[in-house]
Image (spheres, grey):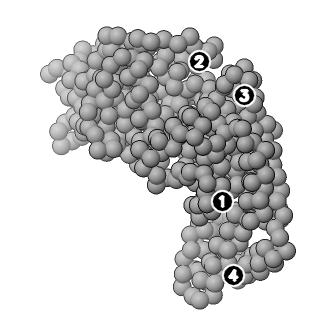
Amino acid sequence: MTVSLHFDAGAIVVRGLERSESPPLPRACLWDERENVYRAPGSEYAPISLALLRNRTPYEDEARQYGELEKGLQIRREPRPFQTEAVKAWEAFHRRAVVVLPTGSGKTEAALLAMDAARRDTLVVAPTLDLIAQWRMTLADRFQRNIGVIGGGEYDLQPISVTTYDSAHRFMENIGARFGLVIFDECHHLPSEIYSRAASRCIAPFRLGLTATLERADGKHAALTTLIGPVAYRKSIVELSGEYLAEYETIRFFVELSDEERKEYDEANKIYRDFVMKQGIRMSSRDGWSQFIIRTSISAEGRRAMAAYQRRRELALAAPSKMDLVEKLLWKHRRDRALLFTERNSAAHALSRRFLAPIITHQTKVSERTRILRDFADGVYNALIASKALNEGVDIPSANVAIVISGSGTTREHVQRLGRILRKQEDKTAVLYELVANDTTEMHASQRRRSHIAYE
């Protein structure tokens, strides 16, 4: 019986082998007694093919549905040395690897060079609709061809296509055999339980992961070695600043609460801490926050503690004294383009009313976001407020000032916000201001999010 490979809803099926006389196959291949075949995740396509070749076992490949791109890049840009180095490093790892480059350094350009080298039907996976729109425009321009889109209400499959992580998870069992190269942009998203299935259900022998912030707080970035490949190349913001990224400085201001705010903060903090201690909740533990949520919902004392927690947080993140400092900084940089980052929508709206600047949140529609970003680039506005938005992948080369009014304690978010203002432009020098309410819990968050070489 002829040995053959088949793609079946995200899995590779090996037919024609007897269990007793089968050649060495990857450990992921399991015997299916119902059909007398071997099954494995689609990502095992390349290892299975190599195992059969090494064993000199003839086989028919019915799984592969992707082709070769007849034409590569039609418009080429002279690459920066580190971009060429990154692609060579990727190729040295059999074109299955992760490249870590700072925001603004040209990760997309490195990916285009990789596509040109591989010349296989390619799927680009990115986390947001904004990013896939950006990818689609770039790919269409540089390859001079129609680019397919899967997601956002569209399903147009082309040899070069773009999709979101959500849509990749949804459709990969149908399209997983259609691409020989898959590029995971912002690949630190991939190790989540749901998104990782997209990687395991596609057969693409060539894989490229791109990110500026590889490490995850949960440690799951280690899974990228299996889902994509090892880290082949890495450069930091510090290594590229000056020559390839804008020179920058970071300035942290510690803002004092007013006497009234301090009194209210301390009272709220005491109510919150007394409740946590009385309940024996360790907020630093893995389930500390969930325990706090549960226990504050079942009693009047708990609801009072939750209200105190929220008020304490509001005072630290959006103290009026911070807003006064923002006004001074905007006046100082009135001839620059400033991005204002907040953790809360309420603070963003307060800033918008005070400074008459537009807002982008995670709820802003794509068309409105595009218009606001275009007007900001054209100088219609010199300030733009972002609430839990603009952290990833958005190209804003004109921005050279960032004011972080509030944020989470994650290093990734803080580095991404710095990256938004580092696009190289003429003699541009970028500056990031971080406003921290002194002697509040925000000081601990600030220390955590600054634990990166870019802030040393």
Mark 2: few, some, or many residues within 10 Å (few <14, many ≥20)? many
Which disc, if any, is residue 299? none
* Secondary element at tag 2: helix
Residue 445 in sight here = yes
Camera-near label (1 vs 4) is: 1
Image side of residue 408 versus residue 257, left or right: left
Mark 3: few, some, or many residues within 10 Å (few <14, many ≥20)? some
Camera-near label (2 vs 1) is: 1
Q: How far apart are marks 2 and 3 (CA)?
A: 22 Å
Q: How far apart are marks 1 and 4 (CA)?
A: 36 Å
Q: Disc 1 marks which residue? A: 354
Camera-near label (4 vs 3) is: 3
Which disc, if any, is residue 83? 2
For marks 2 and 1, the one nearer the N-term is 2
For marks 2 and 3, the one nearer the N-term is 2
On the image, the x and y values in percent for residue 81 come to 63, 13
Q: What residue type is labelled 3?
A: Lys
Q: Which amino acid does label 2 sit on?
A: Gln
| 453 is higher (above) or lower (below) than 450 | above
* Secondary element at tag 3: loop
* Secondary element at tag 1: helix
Q: Are marks 4 and 3 in contact (CB under 8 Å)?
A: no
Q: In which quarter of the image is residue 125?
A: top left
* Secondary element at tag 4: helix
Q: Are marks 2 and 1 in contact (CB under 8 Å)?
A: no
Q: Distance between the residues labelled 3 and 1?
A: 28 Å
Q: Disc 3 marks which residue? A: 428
Q: What residue type is labelled 1?
A: Arg
Q: What residue type is labelled 4?
A: Phe
Residue at the image position 69 percent from the left and 81 percent from the top: 275
On the image, the x and y values in percent for residue 212 come to 60, 34
